[in-house]
Amino acid sequence: MKRLRKPTRKQRRSKLTQEINCLTKIWTAGRLNYPQIDALKLPLGSGAIESLIRQVVNLRLKGNGKYWLPEQAESVLHARCQWIAGAWDSFSEEILTARIYPVVS
């Protein structure tokens, strides 16, 4: 980390310092413990995340005959995430008790 703090141009140095501070904060919180991640056989790359995004977003929201406005797609995606996370009951209870009424034009 100390090597990364070498002097550079002012703007770049400011950005680098910001990124180093962010990584240092994450490291001290124990979230960059690669030996533990490896021992637990958790994926390190972004490929698994990108694959899930494709499955959840593209396959659920895109397809033949499917058309969503951005705000509707976001709601459907949020509902789908709640279902997958096993939080559907509390999510639907919140919706039913929120007293949200549709906008009438």
Image (spheres, rainbow, N blue to C red):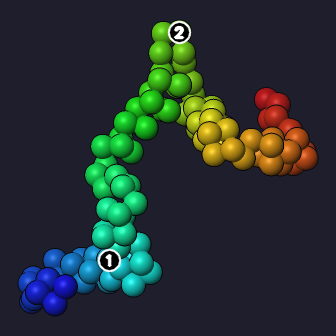
Judging depth in this view, the residue of 65 and 2 nearest the camera is 2
Relative horizontal placement of residue 85, taking residue 92 as reference (left or right): left
The label on residue 63 is none
Could you tell me which residue is drawn at 59 percent across and 36 percent down? Answer: 77
**Figure quadrant of residue 80:** top right
Q: Quarter of the image containing the N terminus?
A: bottom left
Could you tell me which residue is drawn at 54 percent across and 18 percent down? Answer: 67
Cα separation between marks 2 and 1 = 44 Å
Give the residue type at disc 2.
Gly
The label on residue 65 is 2
Mark yes or no: residue 103 visible.
yes
| Residue holding disc 1 | 23
**Figure quadrant of residue 99:** top right
Q: Secondary structure at mark 1?
A: helix
Give the residue type at disc 1.
Leu
Judging depth in this view, the residue of 105 and 47 nearest the camera is 47
